[in-house]
Amino acid sequence: MMEKRNSNKDDRQVIQYFVAKQDTILSRISGECEKNVNTLHLGMLVEAIEDLGGSALRVRVVDTAGSEIWRGTEWRCHRFDLIPVTSEVWKFLPAVSIPQERVRLATYKHLSEELMKLQINDTVWYCSDSKKCNNCLAAIKYIGPVPQLGQGYYFGIDLLDPHEPSKVDALLSKEYFVSTNSEGKFATLSNIFPLKPGGPTGLAKTDKIESLITDLLMGIEAGNNYMNDKKKSVLDTVPSVLLEKFTLFDDNKNNNREQRSISKEYSQSTKSIMHENDSNVAKSAVSYGSTPNKNENKKFGRTESSDLIVGSNVKVLLDSDVHYGVVRWVGTPPGITPGKLMAAVELDDTHPTGTDGTYKDVRYFRCRPHRAVFTDIEQCSRYDTMEKIDDPTTSISPENFGSMESSVIVGMVRPISVKGNLESICGKYRGIQGHHNSCYLDATLFSMFTFTSVFDNLLFRPPNEKDCPQYEEVQRVLREEIVNPLRKNMFVRADRVMKLRTLLEKLSSVSGLTSEEKDPEEFLTSLVAQILNAEPFLKLSSGQDAYHYQLFVEKDDHLNIPTVQQLLEQSFLTSNIRLKEVPSCLIIQMPRFGKSFKMYQKIQPTLLLDVTDIIEDSPRQCTVCGKLAEFECKECYGQCGVGLESIAFCLQCLEKVHRHERRTNHEPKELVVPMEFTILQEQCPVPRLYLELSAVVCIETSHYVCFVKCGSGSEAPWCFFDSMADRKGEQNGYNIPEMVPCPDFPYWLSEEGGNCLTELTDDRNLPEHAKRLLCDAYMCMYQSPDVMMYK
């Protein structure tokens, strides 16, 4: 299909039309716009103008709301976020104002095909309100655009049943068609349903109607089903013009089930065709309420099956064993004896024959793998929740992570920023829930994303030809199932993290990520370097790139409690390297080997890290006079000051210092000074370059925790996070994450706190958090607020 879109700016051919099936992030390719990324919302209309390879498309967004962002711009989008539609259906979609209805029309291919066969004078069902199902018969009198009403094609209809007229439609319709039975009316594609037997709509036979309804009942997903992580009955997707009553079950919370009952009855659908002699019009009805014969035996304390509805807590007899669960769907699937009801039950634990909500390749709802069973409703009976507690045969499933909600959140969520009291965001069930040795990953992710955006490029970088095929799925899980919920709700359930761990295990060279003890750097290698293929955070003068920096130093016995500043400068001096540019983030791994050996018993992280002297070709100060340095002498390290600052000299001070007999054999090296700074050195003092400490990841007895700065600036408070701080249940229980405020954190890293530490003879006298911070530091994360604005 190749069509041209009339446009003053761009007449490139449209290769395919689409409807967005979910919210997703697009990256701008061309056109003037203040945003490089923007959210494409569910139901928005998209024109593909170029296939970029793989799953990527160059698209234009047709925004019926008239937003300036989409005007004249082109964006990168991915096929799996879109539903294709034909050019015929596309003409009608701009007139449909409800996004979920557009998705429904795009998804129900059978229905759309029937609607496209409609012609002038065909008789149809008109439904003015799909929720209330206020439907009546109408005759089509016009099909085409109505500019007065907006974009897209409309149906001009003559209502055959009495109906309250619309003055606006009545006046406007006279310009387009003549109505004979009532005042004319305009309808969109979402308000029309074809039910004319023997005509071009193709619904001449009962089995055709049954086929259409069956297709709708088979659980084709549309609308809000893409917007959240809720499990729904297949009845939820049936247009209300066909189903007047149904029950919807909402399970957005694990083990916290809440029912919204629109009808208390369950039944299978039956269809009937009533022919009118004068008009040869068929009316279709879907009836509910038929139930199978009651089983008088009532096995194992059964209640009558007619009492079971979606949301009922039930016990199920499977292979002579009793299992507990909740009813997700009731009905008669295709291929089953008519009149026989089956129940789809989501079990509290797994079963070998269980599925994820499908039965014979048809999806009825969604749940975790091996949790859904489809069984004769007579095998189910209600139970009181107290009955289950008293039953010694039941136990908490290993996959049960508690009742806290952890929903999928699409789009872009900003990091949390807190000023002052942290009590409102701290407590139990805060942060990332740990599970099966996940603490290395939990602490690292919490440090990287909760309160800072320095790593957000990992969440939004568009894929390229070098990325693996699963790049976008890994990025989506990280962004929508972990980072966004963490920032918005301050909680991520362990099964969400396990999904990421499973992908990393499958796609990277690091094994054991789903079960074994690992280190943060192994996780960073797997996620950041190998799968997300991110640009290295550090560019070294040696020509190498790196994602984190390991401190390599020889132990200095004169240093009792070294600072990160001292160790970093010593490491760069020993390695004879520099950073080519100021990084937006700097991840420093402490000088320790394995989980037990530590070079220093305590290390004091530096709150404000001075990186002026480790940046290649950056202006530096003379250690003697403070003017612009022109030379560097490594042999002078520590003789005329402290740290790397002690080796930088201007020409005059260099000559004066090296007149001493102990320094006559030194070999100074001339520094490269930026020309523009040389000219302005008299007017401009030499700037110092600093990085802020944003997090400290610590380890003790193979368990990782972290201290994280809850915002930007020197006044931002600090918190302590442990993904496994507490536990509910034993072997089959689950971990409880916790955040607690750390108001004393800055003190222990200050000069005053350092003096206190030097006087301390026994580390056991340190407060708990101070001991973990100073004795167990494994990795320090620094960031540059200035540089991160441009990266």
Image (spheres, rainbow, N blue to C red):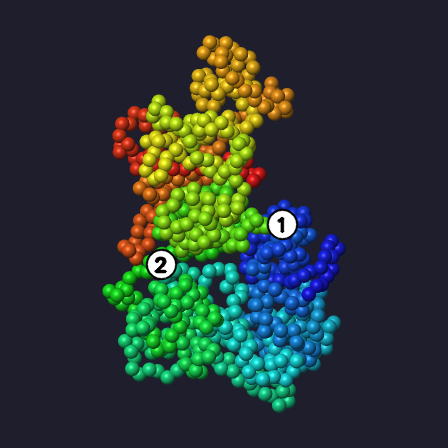
Q: Which mark is residue 28?
A: 1
Q: Which mark is residue 409?
A: none
* Image-based side of 772 in relation to 444, left or right: left
Identify the residue at image location x=33%, y=54%: 734
Identify the residue at image location x=61%, y=64%: 84
Measuring from the top left, give residue 544's x and y in whole percent.
52, 35
Asked where in the image residue 359 lies, by quadrant, the reply is bottom left
Which residue corresponds to mark 2?
399
Identify the residue at image location x=72%, y=77%: 178
Question: Between 627 and 504, which is closer to the camera in this rendering?
Answer: 504
Measuring from the top left, give residue 120's x and y in whole percent.
70, 78
Mark 1 Cα shell of 10 Å, populated few (<14), some (14-19), many (≥20) = many
Asked whether residue 166 appears in the rendered view, the answer is no
Question: Between 375 and 405, which is closer to the camera in this rendering?
Answer: 375
Identify the residue at image location x=45%, y=62%: 230
Name the kind of residue labelled 2 in the image.
Glu
Name the kind of residue labelled 1 in the image.
Arg
Quadrant containing the C terminus in the rendered view: top right
Q: Are marks 1 and 2 in contact (CB under 8 Å)?
A: no
Q: Vertical placement of 780 versus 660: above or below? A: below
